[in-house]
Image (cartoon, rainbow, N blue to C red):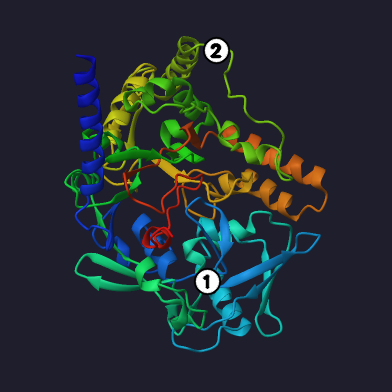
Amino acid sequence: MVLRKQFWRFAVAAIAAFLVNACGSSGDSQVKVVVIGEPDDPFESGVRLSAAGQLVRAATVEGLVAFDEQGRIVPALADRWIVTDDGQSYIFRLRDGTWRDGSELNAKVAARSLRSAIEALRGTPLGLDLASVDEVREMAGRVVEIRLSHPAPYLLQLLAQPEMGLTHGGSGGGPMRLEREGEVAMLTPIPPVELGLPDISHWDDRARAVSLSAAGGKEAVDRFNEGEADLVLGGRISTFPYTSSVGILRGTIQLDPVEGLFGLQVMSSRGFLSDETNREALALAIDRDALIAPFGVAGWTARADIAASLPADAQGGPDAAGSQGQARWAGLSLAQRRANAKARVATWRQGRNGGDGAPALSVWLPAGPGSDLLFTRLKQDFASIGVELSRAKKDETGDLRLLDVVARYPRPVWYYNRFNCTMSKNACSPEADGALAAALKASDPAARAELIRKARDVLTEANIFIPFGSPIRWSLVRGDATGFAANAWGWHPLMPMAMRPK
């Protein structure tokens, strides 16, 4: 009997291994990637890109530096660089080689393209992140210098973003070439010799194509389950429940350990939301642990304010404002918080119309079963303090909207820039913007930290953002897929997936 049990245990394991290796229809000649989104996403232009658009841009238009599959900064068009002691000058030496049209890869063209990329981002949050760039200039031959108005220890992370890719003659320098086949983006690694680089032996044996398409969450997961996709990327909480259909034999669900902003952004400053104490009442009412419990995400931590949302790397950085891990209302139970919030709602109702009529708000959430779960919980939480919640059909019509973004670098300034008044006409804090601007100009580290602290405190009190915790980013990865690694940026470049292991 014992031998029979062992036989079946080994048989099941062997069958499982066979199915994992056989579940992809593309074999080893092609990697099939599906990104959650809209069918046209891979072919976007401009600077406001979807997840699929970012992946294609990064694969076809390199910047000075790039991210590898583990989220580390690696050389791209620049093969090395130095940073001056004062942190206000980054000097890059471009690699040998050419652009795709065979023209020389030189500092003049690279600097011009870099200036154009920065200019195109004006008016976007990423443009604010790049505000420290004072000058981009070409030096001898293949050397480009970026001068800063103040130190920016996160500059390399910014230069590795897909939007910072450099172009020449309207096209990028690879490392992959793009061909469109209907709604599929076919991306093929460019042989190094075509870019004026040394040949790599057996290149044709090592490199393979990546077919990338975008689809809705359910369709993307169905393709994976049916063996029509090797990887599914771009998963968020709105689509997370679809992963329940993924069997263990198909592959694994990978969660990225990302940081960022995940919560409700206040979009209106009218009525009930015109008062910061009323906005805080909404934050008090939310049971954050219960909000995420239906998803079964292990290790997720609830966070009640912007300060607690800052990643660990930001706590001790030169522009950090000390330890901010303690959430607001740490000494209050949920029942006490809700009683406090309910009293504020009653006060507002009494002052507005003699106590009749509950405040009614709308919230925009992206489509998907995960959003449905969030809305059900939020509606219950707000009802517990006397606030009615409905669901807005469009993001621009909601009083509140879900903000779900991953931090591009681990510094407080990234978080504060997301709420800058120049970005939109939504609820914002000019006082916090002023404190941050002054902090970036301050030469004294202690003064800078104090101003950053002020910006943090002002934003916290303004309650224009109601955090839940860290964002959730998931992928589906077939058992024999390579070139993928969960990482802190939730970024999964295509080129490593295209290269077979040596």
Image height of 11 relative to 41, above or below: above
Pair 1/2: label in front: 1
Q: CA distance from mark 1 to mark 2?
A: 48 Å
Residue 113 vs residue 46, the one in the foreground = 113
Q: Could you tell me residue 484's position as x and y percent?
A: 41, 50
Q: Residue furthest left?
A: 226
Q: Which residue is mark 1?
A: 117
Q: Is label 1 in a helix, a strand or a loop? A: helix
Residue 401 makes an appearance in the image: no
Q: Could you tell me which quadrant the C terminus lies in?
A: bottom left
Circles 1 and 2, Cβ within 8 Å, touching? The answer is: no
The earlier-in-sequence mark between 1 and 2 is 1
Q: Tag count in the figure? A: 2
Q: Is residue 314 visible?
A: yes
Q: Quadrant of the N terminus?
A: top left
Comparing 49 with 349, the one in front is 49
Per the rendering, the mark at residue 3 is none
Q: On the image, numbered disc 2 is attached to which residue?
A: 332
At label 1, the amino acid type is Ala
| Relative image position of residue 18 (x, y in whole percent) | 22, 42
